[in-house]
Amino acid sequence: MFVSEMGCSEANTHQKLSLPRSAPYLTGNPEVMQARNRPRKSEKGCLLSSLDARTHLPCEVTAYDWSCSQCTMVLAFFEKWLDGCLRSRVVELWTICIMLRNGIAQFVGSWVSESGYQLRIKKVDKDRALVDFLDRRAAPVQRPYMGGAPSLKMVAHYGSSGIFEVDLWQEGKGFSLDLTHEYDYELDPERREALVPALSRNEQDHFLDAWYALFGPLDHFVRTKAENKRLDAK
C-alpha cells in the first residue's frame, strides 16, 4: 500500500481522517496556528501563578506595570543626563562671559578673600581705578605710616604687563598691593575667577615690613555673591 505525504492511501482517498479536536493548529493555516499558540485566559493565570512562586512577584503584576517601571527608569536617566548637560553649558557660558572682559575691566567690582578681607574697585579710566580695602569687619584699614589715613579711594594703575597696582602709600612711593587676574584660579577649590595678591615696596623702605600684617594674609580674592548677581543681570 502506497501512502502519500498527506497520510492517505490510494485505495481510500475519500475516507475522512480522524484528527484530535485539539489539532486545528496542525493545519497549514498560519493564522490558526498563531491563534492556538496564544495562551488562554485560564493558562495566563497558571503562568502568572508559577512565575509568582519562583520570583515572589505579586500576582497583580501586569505588562502595564512593567512598562511604567521601565519608563520611570528611562526618564530618571534622561533627567540626570540633561541636568549634567545644562550645568556644563552654564559653566561654559559663564567662562566665555568672563573672558570677554579684558584690561582693567577684569578687576572692577567687589571681591572678598577667604579670610574676610574685601576689595572694592571702581574704574576711573582705561588705565586707572580707585580702590577701597576693607578688613574682616568691613572697615577701612588705618595706615599708621600715613598718619592714620584710611584705606579708601586708593589710586590704582593697570599696566601693560597685566598687573594691577594699588598704591598703599602716597602715589609713587613704591608700597603697593599688586593684583593678578586669573580666569579659573587653580588654587581655588572651585577654580573660580580670582585676583591673586602680592605686596611690594622699595628695597630701602624696610620699616614698611612692620605694616604688612595690616592687610591680612595674602589669600586670593573672588567676586562676592552680590557682585556675581549684578553681572548676571547685565
Image (tube, rainbow, N blue to C red):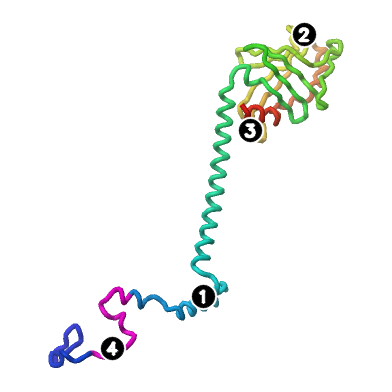
Q: Is mark 2 on a helix, strand or loop?
A: loop
Q: Is residue 24 left or right of residue 67?
A: left
Q: Position of residue 163 (x, y in %)?
A: 65, 16
> If you read the primary sequence from the N terminus, does the residue marked by circle 2 or circle 1 appear first?
1
> If you read the primary sequence from the N terminus, does the residue marked by circle 1 or circle 3 appear first?
1
Q: Magenta span has 30?
A: yes
- The quarter of the picture where the C terminus appears is top right
Q: In which quarter of the image is residue 223?
A: top right
Task: Name the residue beneath numbered marker 3.
Answer: 191
Q: Nearer the viewer, residue 50 or 231?
A: 231
Q: Which of 22 and 95 is in front in this view?
A: 22
Quote the CA–CA distance across marks 3 and 2. Answer: 34 Å
Task: Name the residue beneath numbered marker 2.
Answer: 170
Q: Is mark 4 on a helix, strand or loop?
A: loop
The residues colored magenta run 17-33
Q: In this view, does 183 lie above or below 152?
A: below
Task: Name the residue beneath numbered marker 1.
Answer: 51
Q: Are marks 1 and 4 in contact (CB under 8 Å)?
A: no
Q: What element carries label 1?
A: helix
Q: Do the residues labelled 2 and 1 touch (CB within 8 Å)?
A: no
Q: Residue at x 27, y 76 (%)?
A: 29
